[in-house]
Image (tube, rainbow, N blue to C red):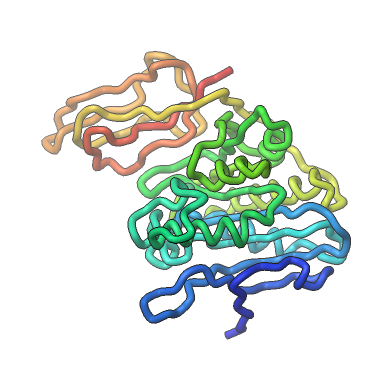
Amino acid sequence: MKAYPHFSHLVLTDFERGQVHRLWLDLIEDAFGTPMSIPVFIVRGVEAGPVLGLTAAVHGDELNGIPVIQRFVNELNPKKLKGTVIGIPVMNLPSFFRHQRRFIDGVDLNHIMPGVADGSASQVYANRFVQRVLSQFDYLIDLHTASHGRINSYYVRADLSNPISAELARLQNPQIIVNNPPSDGTLRGEASERNIPAITVEVGNPRTFQRGLIRTGITGLHNASIMLGMVDDEIEINDDGLTMCPSSFWIYTDVGGLLRVIPEINQRVSKGELIATVTNIFGDKIAEYHAPEDGVVIGKSVNPVNHTGGRVLHLGRLE
Ligand SMILES: [Zn+2]
């Protein structure tokens, strides 16, 4: 097995320009005192320029972003790069091993940023990640997927009032862009607190690799690096069928039972259209749900086992 060096802090100037560095960054320790270390790519370009940060698997079972970062980084030529790319293919390391979204203490890391220096395990982990990694970024692209039991279109959440974030969003060639002001506690929210333009890219479905979407994701990162002046190449834009949503919201059930969600992802629905049914365990239909307004289906539940308050679908409002 190839061994990569361990670091407890990242000092970018310690890494030679014109090279791709692969390393482990120690964040916290387990009960044996063994470091929990995240994999880090540092691509130091020969010339000065911005630091583009790429993160995936902040939710440990959201995997499509991993090959997106690996392949984008491995295709970069550091001899021609201006600036630095820092890629973290798996941010939430212990949950990646456990096929789980949340951290080992049951906390969603993407709700507690920037963490707490002397807090709980998840708070310290989040805080050290922010201090040691995020704080070095000039731009952030954070790669996610739907949660377990749901599927997503290929879409981007971004604060469209920030022109750089809006442009980074468009360059991902998504099916849908949702205007979404940064929320407290997320990695993107923390980036925005630090004036780091940031977008969240939702690359399809959890717990799998989707080859087509991974390829689109790589093109998106390549486009971003060109737009930021780091790589000299031509941007590839394909915005056929792009839907812009000024906002979005989830629709929830108010009964328990077996849920069937009817429209496909990225499908337009009209106000009043039947979007879901719930049957009881004997097969009797007990509820119907209709679209409260015209919109586009950003994501939906595919797990039929539904408690009261379960998510039906994520509807994007149309302009
Ligand atoms: Zn996620």
Q: Residue at x 43, y 43 (%)?
A: 151
Q: Can you give x and y, in whole percent of width and height, for residue 115 in the image? A: 47, 53
Residue closest to the eye, 209 or 188: 188
Q: Residue at x 50, y 49 (%)?
A: 113
Q: Can you give x and y, in whole percent of width and height, for residue 201 in the image? A: 58, 44
In which quarter of the view is residue 103 placed? Answer: bottom left
Q: Is residue 46 above or below residue 216?
A: below
Residue closest to the eye, 282 or 32: 32
Q: Is residue 218 above or below residue 258?
A: below
Q: Residue at x 40, y 54 (%)?
A: 101
Residue lying farthest front?
A: 118
Q: Residue at x 57, y 85 (%)?
A: 1
Q: Is 95 on the left or on the right of 134, as rendered?
A: left
In which quarter of the view is residue 12 placed? Answer: bottom right
Q: Is 142 on the left or on the right of 270, as rendered?
A: right
Q: Can you give x and y, in whole percent of width and height, for residue 135 in the image? A: 64, 54
Residue closest to the eye, 237 or 166: 166
Q: Is residue 305 above or below residue 133?
A: above
The C terminus: image quadrant: top right
Q: Can you give x and y, in whole percent of width and height, for residue 146 in the image? A: 45, 45
Q: Is residue 110 above or below residue 240?
A: below
Residue lying farthest left?
A: 282
